[in-house]
Amino acid sequence: MSLRRFALKRLLLVVPTLFGVSVLTFALVHLTPGDPVNFILALEPEATEADRAALRAEHGLDQPVYVQYFDWATGVLTLDFGTEIQSGRPVSDIILTRLPPTIALGIFGWVFAIVIAIPTGIYAAMNRQQLADDVSRVIALAGIAIPNFWLGLILILVFAVSLGPWTVLPPRQPLYHPEMLFHLILPGLTIGTASAATMMRIMRSSMAEELNKDYVTTARAKGLPERTVILKHVLRNSLISVVTVAAFITAGILAGSVVVEVVFAWPGLGYEFIGAIEDREYYVIMGITLFIGIVIIVMNLLADLVYALLDPRIRY
């Protein structure tokens, strides 16, 4: 199967997947207990039933559920995710406003994962069955097993409470302000730790497998320096596995940002998402969930295409 046909087949699978995500998101939100109109008007004791009915009609909440889904889904096709009930702000504006901090946090976590995982995985593979390899495996397992929220709380306890150099408060500066890097460090380490551990294990396994192949023995028999064998031959082949999982790691970082942003009060999509759940903001919840779902699906699609490009065997 050609790469073009493989890509087209994967693209066609995206359509039913997105439909399933949208239906599931809509159903879960509407099955959640609580009426958003009653929640919003709870602080206005003078509100009458006519006011409640008018607010429901304004946002289409008085329509049958299937009509509400059709109206919302057709709006999504034109990038209209609805409006926030309390403020009337378009959900697309909320997503665009909250997306840059989430992207910054994801990039920091991703770079941290790469910087830690690649050299550590190489070192562990070149020292197999030795103390360094055992230590790296224990650290990797711990990094994968520790929940993000728990690690975040421990970092806050150590660096913001006990040692005190970090101020863990919602950042007030614009994202491009140099001080924001200071606010990024702790949540970035939190969100990147599990990814670094996963990539380190993949790098170590891939590198160890390549070291046992015949071409490495041949290269060494030819008298090539060990540095050349590792960097020019083994590392390049080993990175194929890491590259193919990088997209999955990116999707995992985005999904994991929901919890980390709440722990560190980081003003991204995840923080907005939890606030929307507390306020029963149907359209904000559905919009952010669907947006994250789309990003994860696209990243998985890219991973499939990169994998197919690097290893043509999986196209068949």
Image (cartoon, rainbow, N blue to C red):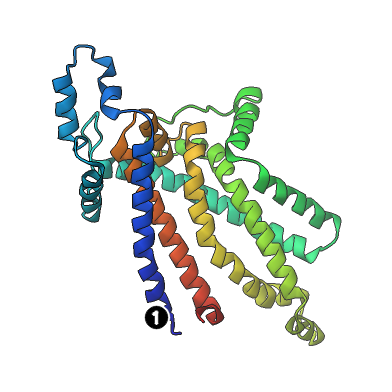
User: Where on the picture, by quarter, is residue 280?
Assistant: top left
Q: Position of residue 195 (x, y in %)?
A: 59, 52
- Assess disc 1: are there few (<14), some (14-19) or many (≥20) residues with their C-alpha within 10 Å of its C-alpha: few
Q: Position of residue 237 (x, y in %)?
A: 64, 75
Against 239, residue 214 (above or below) is: below
What secondary structure is found at the residue carrying circle 1?
A: helix
Q: Position of residue 239 (x, y in %)?
A: 61, 69
- Report which residue position mark 1 lands on: 5
Residue 110 is left or right of residue 158, and the answer is left
Residue furthest right as drawn: 130
Q: Residue at x 53, y 52 (%)?
A: 110
Q: Residue at x 39, y 74 (%)?
A: 9
Name the one closer to the observer, 114 or 288. Answer: 288
Number of callouts in the render? 1
Residue 93 is left or right of residue 222, and the answer is left
Residue 254 is left or right of residue 228, and the answer is left
Against 300, residue 61 (above or below) is: above
Against 102, residue 58 (above or below) is: above
Can I make out residue 56 in this image? yes
Q: Position of residue 18 (x, y in %)?
A: 36, 58
Against 110, residue 35 (above or below) is: above
User: Where on the picture, by quarter, is residue 28?
Assistant: top left
Residue 305 is left or right of residue 118, and the answer is left
Identified by mark 1, the residue type is Arg
Q: Residue at x 21, y 53 (%)?
A: 74
User: Where on the picture, by quarter, is residue 210?
Assistant: bottom right
Can I make out residue 176 in this image? no
Name the one closer to the observer, 205 or 81. Answer: 81
